[in-house]
Amino acid sequence: MSKVIYPKVALIGLGLIASSISHAIRRAGLAAEITGFARSAETREIARGIGLCDQVYDTAADAARGADLVILCVPVGAMGQVAADIAPVLKPGATVSDVGSVKQAVIEAVGPHIPQGVHFIPAHPMAGTEHSGPRSGFAELFDNRWCLLVPVEGSEDAAVERMQSLWVGMGAKVEVMEPEHHDLVCAVTSHAPHLIAYTMVGVADDLRRVTDYEVIQFSAAGFRDFTRIAASDPTMWRDVFMNNKEATLEILGRFTEELFSLQRAIRTGDGDHLFDYFTRTRAIRRGIVEAGQDTDAPDFGRGGGG
Ligand code: NAP
């Protein structure tokens, strides 16, 4: 029995997420044909060389022409432009989706370009690594990870369900969410933590009393994990913060308050406050492990990479 959900899938942008989608779709046979487009000739050449898609085109419109599903896999700030480029060639009944880490801004940028008779079902797979580019993808990236679907007003249930089947077929668990809530959830779980990691690595770099050698040599798991996160793609993360301003600023405001209260506890020797706080946070970590979203291994099961 055929498992094909969308006969022809077009991937616009051919980085980590798009290449993982291609591998995951092929693993489960969810499409009969995959086309692709990337901005630079270099990425297109690499994608052709490794056979990432059945056909890689030099324009987004050529890749999207006749597709049943077009997934925008470019940085959040580039979504509006690629949507404008593909709009004239979208076939009636097709679905446009995206994988952007921010949803309200993407809906505002892409929505106006979607023609009548085309479905728009934004999505956000909550999975990634610090690597980028067409070679960095792998079929297992979405296995047992959440993919949040954020349908726009008036979306047809059947179109949402079809998109859900695709993500489930790629190994993910799916939940449907409102755009504003999505952006707040991601500000807490991903965006603010990334900014904190960037800051901590920046601080270590600025602190000349601790040498680079010491930072690298004696970096225990905590700092090493920060450096891994802080190695993430600068374009992608610049766009995330430029486009999820409100929620990120709200969370960072709360973060700063908590940090000051811990700072005060250290200064005043309030050990009980620190102990109670760390006990609460330890329980949250246990919850994440029990929910199957991470492992209890000392290196977080990452084996030094991905
Ligand atoms: P990536 O590996 O850096 O790939 C980005 C792709 O977008 C590349 O093919 C790049 O083309 C293309 N691109 C960049 N700027 C463009 C522009 N202005 N116009 C047209 N194409 C452009 O990025 P990624 O990690 O796959 O991220 C893609 C999307 O997924 C982003 O929206 C991100 O927020 C979201 N996301 C990422 C993660 C993660 O952890 N990485 C997780 C979930 C969601 P060239 O190679 O030719 O430059």
Image (spheres, rainbow, N blue to C red):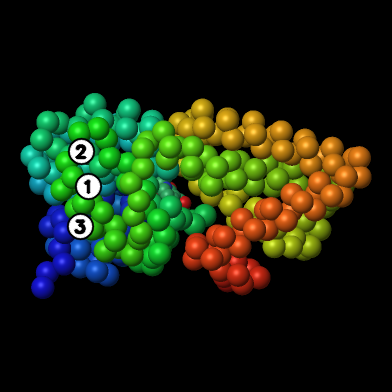
* Image quarter of residue 144: bottom left
Give the left or right position of residue 40, taking residue 226 as reference. left
**Of discs 2 and 3, which sits in the foreground?**
2
Local SS, label 3? strand
Q: Which mark is residue 160?
A: 1
Local SS, label 2? loop
Give the left or right position of residue 227, taking residue 167 as reference. right
Q: Disc 3 to disc 1, how far (Cα)?
A: 20 Å
Q: Which residue is mark 3?
A: 34
Above-or-below relation of 265 to 30: above
Q: Quick one: 95 or 177, which is closer to the camera?
A: 177
Identity of the amino acid at label 1?
Answer: Val
Identity of the amino acid at label 2?
Answer: Ser
Residue 218 position, x and y percent, is 79, 62
Instruction: Tell me whether circle 2 and circle 1 mark residues in contact (CB < 8 Å).
Output: yes
Q: Disc 2 to disc 1, how far (Cα)?
A: 7 Å
Q: Which residue is mark 2?
A: 155
* Image quarter of residue 53: bottom left
Above-or-below relation of 51 to 74: below
Q: Earlier in the sequence, mark 2 or mark 1?
A: 2
Identity of the amino acid at label 3?
Answer: Ile
